[in-house]
Amino acid sequence: MSNVPFTIMGTDYVQLIVGNAKQAAHYYQTQFGFDPVAYQGLETGDREKASYVLVQNKIRLVLTTPYLASSDLNEHLRLHGDGVKDVAFWVDDAEAAWKYTTEQGATSVREPFVISDDDGEVKLASIHTYGDTIHTFVQRDNYKGLFLPGFIPFETRVQTKPVGLNFIDHFVGNQPENQMTKIAEWYERVFGFTRFWTVDDKDISTEYSALRSIVVTNDNQRIKMPINRPAVGLKKSQIQEFVEYYSGPGVQHIAFDTNDIVQTVTQLRDNGVVFLDVPAEYYDELPKRVPEVEENIDDLGQLGILVDKDEFGYMLQIFTMPVQDRPTLFYEIIQRKGAKGFGKGNFKALFESIERAQARRGNL
């Protein structure tokens, strides 16, 4: 156990800066099954931005759009397009978290402050991490409201149909060349995180591209974060493609846990979510590679679900195509049946699928 004087209980919310939060909220509701529950904007007295809060079980997304051309948030949109701004951590002591991390070298965004309403109070503080991404510490033990003070309930006539997403399993930060180890060491020093899993280009490569990855985690493993960087290949890797179109480092994808990936992915496909394709040959070898798989192989093949195993069990995973026009942010759906890894055995098939999509975009 580390000597860090605060506890991260999990991911509190993920904030995305988007070009049109109202439309994005509708997209995440109808395609991914998130329920829009809260709103902040002109009607609540916020003259800078509109924000919609969407929830599915323990996952909370905040979609934010600036009103004014002079808003700093527009620079985020200009550089990155729709993308993740804030991965907020639910903590027991926001002030202690801010004080400790800044003493270890983190740059402060907002010193600890309290916001309140009739439902209680929340203490917040924020620090910079890689690129333009930040972490906000959220202490909400004295609050019983919907999300945060300043938000009001959001009502819509559109019926939300959840798809079985439970919580954020992990989120991935892509880094430019030579930055991966530096960022991983930053999390180790600033947060007391430890290295959970590591792969290099000898493990993960195709004819054209490769990556290296270090996964860091906190003590209770509620936060798991692969830090990726490109490795040298014959052509441009998907990590490098992300960095170029995102204008630097950022959150490449977020993995959502489910208890029944076949049912979840079936619903998502019916809703219009587009996933990476997987060659049929992958499923010919699957029974030999993961003989303990309980799911129907034909069902997995029709849906394009990947399977991998480690010494603890096996896991099933699938990746969406980018959810905006820039080839940047996408999502992963994951079901763990004991396995603690991140699908190293799937990476070759995954990379080849991504490379086919890159080739269609003219970016391979």
Image (cartoon, rainbow, N blue to C red):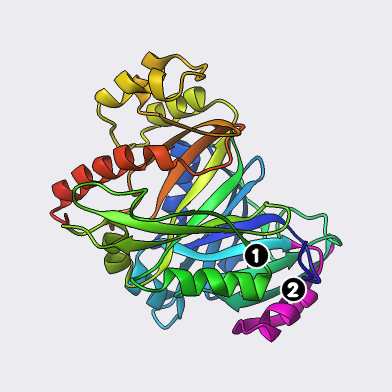
Q: Earlier in the sequence, mark 2 or mark 1?
A: 2
Q: In percent of the image, x 15 and y 48: which residue is there?
A: 359
**150 and 253: which one is in front?**
253
Q: Amino acid at mark 2?
A: Ala
Local secondary structure at mark 1: loop
**326 and 118: which one is in front?**
326
Left or right, 14 with respect to 356, comes to right
Q: Which residue is mark 1?
A: 193
Is residue 284 found inside the magenta-colored segment of the image?
Answer: no
Q: How many marks?
A: 2
Is residue 97 found inside the magenta-colored segment of the image?
Answer: yes
Left or right, 187 with respect to 228, comes to right
What percent of the width, then of the height, locates residue 161? Answer: 54, 30
Report crowding for label 2: few under 14, some 14 to 19, many 20 or more residues within 10 A (C-alpha). many
What percent of the width, then of the height, locates residue 134? Answer: 55, 72
Quarter of the figure that contains the C terminus: bottom left
Task: In the rendered structure, find residue 164 and report the number of the disc placed on it.
Answer: none
**Residues rendered magenta in the picture:** 91-118
Left or right, 354 with respect to 65, comes to left
Task: Please tell me in which quadrant of the rendered image residue 320 appears.
Answer: top left
Local secondary structure at mark 2: helix
Q: Amino acid at mark 1?
A: Phe
Q: Which residue is mark 2?
A: 97
What percent of the width, then of the height, locates residue 204? Answer: 34, 48
**227 and 72: which one is in front?**
227
Q: Can residue 133 be seen at all in this image of the molecule?
A: no
Q: In percent of the image, x 67 and y 62: which residue is there?
A: 89
Q: In percent of the image, x 69 and y 54: which residue is there?
A: 10
Spatial CA span between label 2 and label 1: 13 Å
Viewer-nearest of labels 2 and 1?
1
Left or right, 337 with respect to 121, comes to left
